Each structure stands twice: as structure tokens, then as C-alpha cells.
Amino acid sequence: MTARRRLLAVAAAVGVLAVDLAHEALTPTPFHHPRAPAALLLIAVLAVAVLATVPRAPSLVLSLAGGIAAGGALGNLASALVWRAGIPDPLVHGAYAFNLADVALVAGDATLLTTALVVAWDHRRRLREPI
């Protein structure tokens, strides 16, 4: 079952990454934000950590949410490597400019946190077991 959840997480991450890169390539924008190399390394490490650990939990929704969040992180990482001016932000709402990877990060993280709390509540008796 863990393999199925891991496949779901990786597929979600790759899907978000592909959609984000396609959107940025097809939507020219004057707005970009650069990232420091250390930030890019941290993004890569966290995305891999999420994809490696989250599917171990007994929840397909948790795996999907982790994959979406990791895909957003990988989308920003790939964008930073592809565009010299920095990560493109083709979506503008008032004073805020952002991209689909940012939306995926927020949605994935919110779902990840909410689902983790629900799974923990459902298995609350196991939280008191000795390790």
C-alpha cells in the first residue's frame, strides 16, 4: 500500500510541476522573483523529504496533498533554474504577483496540515504507544 501512496504523491508532484512550467512558458509576465542558491537547495531537500516521508502515513489524501505541495516546490525550483530573471509570476491580483506553483504550495500545505490532524485524531490512541 505504501508503494501506491508513493506513486500517487510522485504523480501529483510531476503533474503540478508540468502544469506550472507550461503556464509560465505560455504566459509572459514582467514580474519575477529571484531565489538565492541556498533557498533553492532547501526547496529541493524539503520536496524530496515530503515525497519520501508523507506516503508512509496511512492516507491517500495525505499522499496527494504532499505530492501537490512538493510539486509546487519543485515547480518553483525548476522555474528558478530555467528563467534567468527569477521565478516568473504571471498571476497578478492587486499588489500580489504569484504563480501556479505558489498556489499548489499553499493548497497542498493546507490540505497536508488539515489531513494530518484528522489522521492523528483518528489514530489518537496510537499516539500514546511507547516507541
Image (spheres, grey):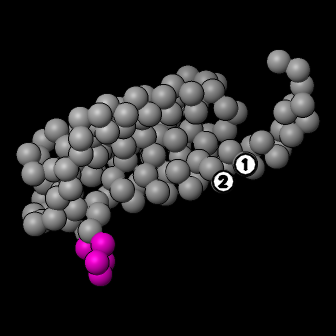
Q: Position of residue 76 (x, y in %)?
A: 28, 46
Task: State left or right for residue 130 relative to residue 96.
Answer: right
Q: Position of residue 78 (x, y in %)?
A: 23, 40
Q: Is residue 10 visible?
A: no
Task: State left or right for residue 45 relative to residue 7.
Answer: left
Residue extending farthest to the bottom is 94
Q: Which amino acid lies under the numbered mark 2 shown in the image of this protein? A: Thr
Q: Residue at x 61, y 42 (%)?
A: 62
Q: Which residue is mark 1?
A: 117
Q: Secondary structure at mark 1?
A: helix
Q: Position of residue 52 (x, y in %)?
A: 51, 25
Q: Which amino acid lies under the numbered mark 1 shown in the image of this protein? A: Leu
Q: Nearer the viewer, residue 71 or 41?
A: 41
Q: Position of residue 91 (x, y in %)?
A: 25, 69
In the rendered view of the protein, which quadrant contains the C terminus?
A: top right
- Rendered position, 130 above or below 32: above
Q: Tell whether position 53 is magenta.
A: no
Q: Residue at x 52, y 51 (%)?
A: 109
Q: Residue at x 13, y 54 (%)?
A: 25
- Which of the 4 image quarters holds residue 57? top right
Q: Which residue is mark 2?
A: 114
- Which of the 4 image quarters holds residue 92? bottom left
- Gap in Å between the C-alphas at discs 2 and 1? 5 Å
Q: Tell whether position 94 is magenta.
A: yes
Q: Secondary structure at mark 2?
A: helix
Magenta region, main secondary structure: strand
The span picked out in magenta is 92-96
Contact between labelled residues 1 and 2, with CB atoms less than 8 Å apart: yes
